[in-house]
Amino acid sequence: MAAAPAYAKNFKIAVGDSGGSSQEATGIGFVKALEELSGGKHTATLFLNGQLGSEQDTVNEAAIGTLDMSILAINNVTPFSPTVGVFTLPYVILSLEDAEKLTQGPIGQELTENTINDAGVRIIAWTYTGFRVLTNSKKPVKSVADLQGLVIRVPKNEIMIDTYKAWGISPTPMAWSETFAGLQTKVVDGQDNPYTTINAMKFYEVQKYVTNIRYIFSIEPLIISEQVFQELSEEDQNIILEAGKAATAASAQFLRDKEAEIKQILLDEGMEITDPENNEEEFIKLATEAVWPKFYDSIGGVDKLNAVLAEIGRDPV
Ligand code: MLT
């Protein structure tokens, strides 16, 4: 086993999104707490906007220890550790409070252990980014019928691909780092991500219509390479874990403080925001009926989904 470094460390943190994003808020919260808790011994530097590679690539890099940390959407972790998919099943998490309860409770802890074993990365903080709303450049979408004919980008994530298939279209999987260009050159008509991400990434420059679908509440963990973590002294490991808790709290505060303001910025930038008709009923029915059963095995069985639903006070399937 490698000796614990007695020297100060400047951790490199890859961040998928740009400045002003929820991911950045988590990163800033982490750096601040790390510096305070280590008495200035350790620091960390954020590399924003996918500078260190696509979100999925950063998981591989952290796994082999060539990258210290990454902040990325949970849907980009699922391919490496399928049980975290329980957080991206459509219409499971219905509020920020649900997200906080699940990630900070026993289920979040269990998924952290799974990512260590499956992917060689440890989740040390959670970013809460809000619901992934649908944007597109062509027309207002209120119903599943309106969605037909649109080419929608999704991450390379089977649950999300199958959700759009349940809604009748075949989406285009594309890395996050290529998405702005894909929208700009009209290779794709639309995508989904939360308001704060749409704003930070300036998607209003290339997208006009927003539909408030609420199928996924976006959760974006801060992961550390397990190899890097194990090389730290126990004292430094505890500092990292405590700084992670502070980062999680900073992220929740950012969303509570900023989401409404950011929605207004999108309107001021000329986006048109609409709600799906009939309280999203058709979207919900099609997605949950087709997608949930298909992923029971990969998330660890239907009992796992029921445990999640129970923890947030919902009826079992
Ligand atoms: C994605 O759509 O790939 C992610 O949500 C991007 C992000 O990290 O914001």
Image (cartoon, rainbow, N blue to C red):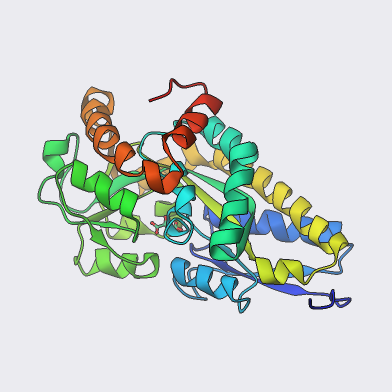
Instruction: Count up the numbered dots.
Output: 0
What residue is shown at x 46% (from left), y 29% (from top)? 306
Q: Nearer the viewer, residue 221 or 45?
A: 221
Q: Quadrant of the C terminus?
A: top left
Q: Is residue 35 visible?
A: yes
Q: Is residue 241 left or right of residue 208?
A: right
Is residue 144 found left or right of 15 in the rendered image? left
| Ligand 1 sits in quadrant | bottom left
Rendered residue at 48%/53% (across/down): 74
Q: Position of residue 162 (x, y in %)?
A: 25, 48
Which residue occupies the foreground of this view, 164 or 117?
117
Q: Is residue 185 above or below residue 160?
A: below
Q: Which residue: 19% across, 47% down?
A: 165
- Residue 60 in the image, given as x and y percentages of width and height: 51, 72
Q: Image point 46% across, 62% down: which residue?
A: 80
- On screen, residue 240 versus residue 175, left or right, reads right
In this view, the residue in front, 272 or 85, is: 85
Residue 198 position within the rendered picture, expressed as x and y whole percent measured from the top left: 39, 53
- Answer left or right for 141 relative to 43: left
Quick one: quadrant of the N terminus?
Answer: bottom right
Residue 168 screen position, x and y as percent: 14, 44
Is any part of residue 209 visible from this angle?
A: no
